[in-house]
Image (tube, helix red, strand yellow):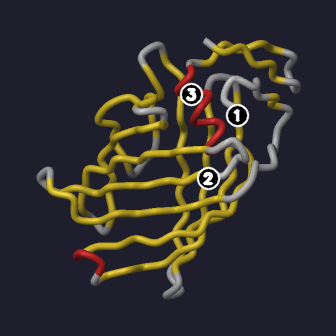
Amino acid sequence: MIETLDMNTNTAYFYSPAFHYAQDCLAGDRVWTGQAAALWGLYIRKFRISSTGVIQGKELLFDEQIDFADGESQSRSWRLRDTDGGVDLITDNAMPIRLGGINKGKFEIEYRLKMSGMWFRYTDIFDVDERGNVTNVGIIKIFGIPVMRVTAYSSGKAELTTGFEPSAAFS
């Protein structure tokens, strides 16, 4: 467990390493660029995401505004909760398959995601480097077969929007 002090409430929290890693990737204000690629690269859809991740106790509230190059926009809100067994995902358009955790040095969470009225199996893998750059790779599967790969990148450390003060455990 990693101890962290919330400067707003002067409360110490003990976070799991997986939740702390998720905070390093998603907390604060970030801008992401990326693309979704399907059909062996024949279909590519580029996007830009503006995101805000706010830590409230043992939860990370993550809001994202996705603007696609073709003009479509989507907004999503996610809530990640630190639990004894890993990181739980709570949202209207997704159902967790297994709790998030650290796998091969990266934060990974798997869930079913509803898009265009259909449910897909989605594996999200986040990696943060020592400079705070975050790479996210999402793999979408239908019946166990990968059908789409989503990649996104955010450079530099995020500006935190709360009094949260992360420990140096993953710096």
Q: CA distance from mark 2 to mark 3?
A: 17 Å
Asked if residue 145 is positioned above or below residue 12 in the image, the reply reads: below
**Cβ atoms at labels 3 and 1 below 8 Å apart:** no
Q: CA distance from mark 1 to mark 2?
A: 12 Å
In front here: 88 or 47?
47
Of badges 3 and 1, the one in the foreground is 3
Crowding near pointer 3: few (<14 within 10 Å), some, many (20+)? many
Asked if residue 155 is positioned above or below residue 132 in the image, the reply reads: below
Asked if residue 100 is positioned above or below residue 141 in the image, the reply reads: above
Q: Measuring from the top left, give residue 153's x and y in whole percent.
A: 58, 61
Q: Measuring from the top left, give residue 81's x and y in whole percent.
A: 53, 28
Count every numbered label the image shows and give the total: 3
Residue drawn 43% across the image and 55% down it: 137
Q: Quadrant of residue 17?
A: top right
Circle 2 is placed at which residue position?
63
Sequence order check, earlier mark of 1 and 2: 1
In front here: 49 or 91?
49
Is residue 44 shown left or right of residue 71? left
Q: Measuring from the top left, give residue 88's x and y in whole percent.
A: 45, 30
Residue drawn 66% across the image and 15% down it: 2
SS category of the residue bearing label 1: strand
Residue drawn 21% across the image and 59% down it: 146
Circle 3 is placed at which residue position?
19
Residue drawn 53% across the image and 86% down it: 71
SS category of the residue bearing label 2: strand
Query: For the residue marked with disc 3, what is the amino acid?
Result: Phe
Residue 55's label in the rendered image is 1
